[in-house]
Image (spheres, rainbow, N blue to C red):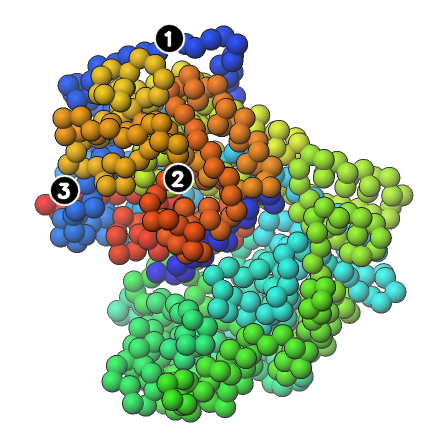
Amino acid sequence: MRKCNKALASVLALVMAGSMITGCGRETTGTPVDPNAGETDPVVTADPGTVEPTEDEVYWFDEFDVMTLSDKEYGTDYESLYDHIGRDITIADVTEDPDTGFAYITVDGEKKLLGLDFLSFAMVYNNTPAGEYKTEDDVYAAWWRYYITRWNALLPEIPLYSNEYYDLYNAKIGQVAENPTNPYWSPADALIDWTSSKDDNDIIIGNTTELSGQFRYSAFGKTSPGAADQDVEALTSGLATIEKTKEGGYTWNDTVVASHSDVINEDGSKTFTITIKDDLCYSDGTPITAKDYLVFPMAFYTQVATQASGSQVQGLTVVGFSDYNAYTGPDSTEGCKEMKGFRLLDDYTFSVTISADYIPYFYDITYASFGPQYPAMWLGGADILDDGEGCYLTDDFYAKNGDDYVVAKIIKATATDTSDAAYAKYPYSGPYCVKSYDTTDSSAVLVRNEYFKGNYEGTVPSIDKIVYKKVVSATQLEDFKAGGIDIISGITGGAATDEALALADSSDGAYAYIHYSRAGYGKLGFRADYGPAQFSEVRQAIAYCMNRGQFAKDFTGGYGGVVDGPYYSGSWMYQEAVKQGMILNTYATSADSAIEVLEKGGWVYAADGSAYTEGVRYKMIPGDVITENDKNYQSVDGTYKTTEVDGNYYMPLVINWYGTVDNEFTDLLQTGFKENENVRVAGMAVYNTTGDFAPMLDELYQQAIYGYYSGSPMYCAFNFATGFASAVYDYSYNLTIDPSMYDDYSAYYFKDYADIYWLK
């Protein structure tokens, strides 16, 4: 379980719609219903309960299986298909439907459709070359293609626009065009290759996110660290064994690593052995040894660090983590003092052993990623030793003052002290060091680390000083023209982009720009286990009702497009999947298509259970499967409610949508979604509430994380954004049907019925 708590981190990390993201995808085609043409005659179908579904309709009826899981026990009544047989499957066992692109395997003589949970796991864990797929990359791309195809069909969220981004910069900053930014490579990454011809050989970088000054460990005690703090942390941390590349991959850092090897052990675990070079130093000249690379996990895998930060850093992939995490000191009755998966082999060599449960893994190079940390910052005066059974911390690390760990106070002070003295107390491993932080204007000054040996390409910075400051979007262009900042990154939208490009084009070479498609999109997201939005036909109908191509054009001012799944079209796996013949539905705008999928999905009733003729459609849900929340589902104003007739329930096709305020995305959805004539013609109604981002998240979580949730669910649709800028595309656990992990890991509050394997 490599991922953090989803509900408190994953969605919080999403970018709010005002600073949207990109991708370069196809626009949808088709002609929307003419709003002046009048209402089309509704098509009435027979009661689906009296009709035996055809083979292509079984899909819609099987979705009720998910609703029955609430009173079933995982591991006794059912389990995921991947848990049942997934580890034994290779890509050669898969057959593909040539019309839909769906993937199938045969289990116990029965053909089984593969769902999103299965495919997300197989994508990263089942990469053994087989059949026509000769390399691990080929296999990964095939699984990825099946995953995206299935996702596109079930549509757990609807991508609505993907932006083009522009970075405007002062031409006195050199080598930018030769070393450009991209979705994987931000200005904080790229400036190591840039030069400055300014008098002070400096660069001023602005960010709309406010600096908190927590630069040693920006995520300490937080569910969502700010982007600016993360940038400064990245600029002052370096010499990792594995580094992200400009192309969005990962590579061994030959500047740091003298040698490395890996071996699969008899029990299926995998051991990476790493020898670092003997000439690495911190910014004060202190030598860096192998022990320094284990400081962070050895400290933060403990209950001492948990007490300091209030959260637990997970290391479940490493052999021995659970036992080590349970150990609380010399008097501990639980756990183990040694972290068995870590070994110190000599002054410059260490190893890490990964549990067989997480091997093989497509991105297993990331298991070997470690960076040096100055020991005193996180260990106090304690030491890391190894007597042959694994690494352990000396007893003074666990010393207590009453119920409090003494070192916990040191850890907290290191992480949260924002004084200049604190920044100077310990040295840095990255290309820059923090010299000062000004709380009055939220700015930090960084100076070059003369001891830094280089990044993975051996590059050392030439710019002497970085000033990192908060800027305001509305005035950042004026600040730029006045010399207050040297680069504005991520400019997007029609008016803002037009103004920035006009400034550069008329500057006689004083200013320049680069541009790229950013990985991600603005979206209409759903609470996909509640209300009408839990049914795939409803999400599909919404997509058919909306003209996504026009929406993207309107929102981005022509500087963007739309994608048809959770991907960045510039990624290698997308390009390979297209070569393999990926099949995606573009959801061309059509009220008729929306009506067709709704009727197939059973939205053919009126509130009293009679056949639908006009107005809002209803769907019959059997009384033995409906949840209490769905029994109580109603429109925000109470006009439409779920009704009971003869023991069955009829849910109205009403979407309660929560949008954030002061947001152009929300504003455009008023016409593009809520007041869309196709929505009305299809027999759907949309109710809208606007508010701040934190209350919206509480409604999405159906929990009072921020203290706003009333305890009664209401909303099933939300607008925000998401990104795919990480080089690791891994959604395992995020589509789980296991209730023990669902609340923490589910990406969309969505369970694919195809992932259910009934045990009895």
Residue 411 shown left or right of residue 328 in the figure: right
Question: Mark 1: which secondary structure?
Answer: loop
Q: Which residue carries the number 1 mark?
A: 41
The residue under label 3 is which amino acid type? Asp
* Marks 2 and 3 in Cβ contact (< 8 Å): no
* Marks 1 and 3 in Cβ contact (< 8 Å): no
| Distance (Cα) linking label 2 and label 3 | 41 Å
- Can I make out residue 649 in this image? yes
Residue 153: image x %, image y %? 37, 32
Label 1 or label 2, whichever lies nearer to me, is 2
Which residue is located at x 34 percent, y 43 percent? Answer: 713
| Mark closer to the chain start, 1 or 3 | 1
Q: Quadrant of the N terminus?
A: bottom left
Q: Quadrant of the C terminus?
A: top left
| Label disc, if present, on residue 715 of the rendered structure | 2
Q: Which residue carries the number 3 mark?
A: 108
Label tally: 3
| Distance (Cα) linking label 1 and label 3 | 47 Å
Which residue is located at x 31 percent, y 13 percent? Answer: 613
The residue under label 1 is which amino acid type? Asp
Residue 578, relative to residue 708: is it above or below?
Answer: above
| Label disc, if present, on residue 286 of the rendered structure | none
Please name whichever residue, 629 or 514, is drawn nearer the observer in this view of the structure. Answer: 629
Question: Mark 3: which secondary structure?
Answer: loop
Residue 60, relative to residue 511: is it above or below?
Answer: above
- Crowding near the residue tagged with mark 2, few <14, some 14–19, many ≥20 C-alpha atoms within 10 Å: many
| Mark closer to the chain start, 2 or 3 | 3
The residue under label 2 is which amino acid type? Tyr
- Crowding near the residue tagged with mark 1, few <14, some 14–19, many ≥20 C-alpha atoms within 10 Å: few
Residue 231 shown left or right of residue 760 in the figure: right
Please name whichever residue, 555 or 402, is drawn nearer the observer in this view of the structure. Answer: 402
Which residue is located at x 32 percent, y 21 percent? Answer: 617
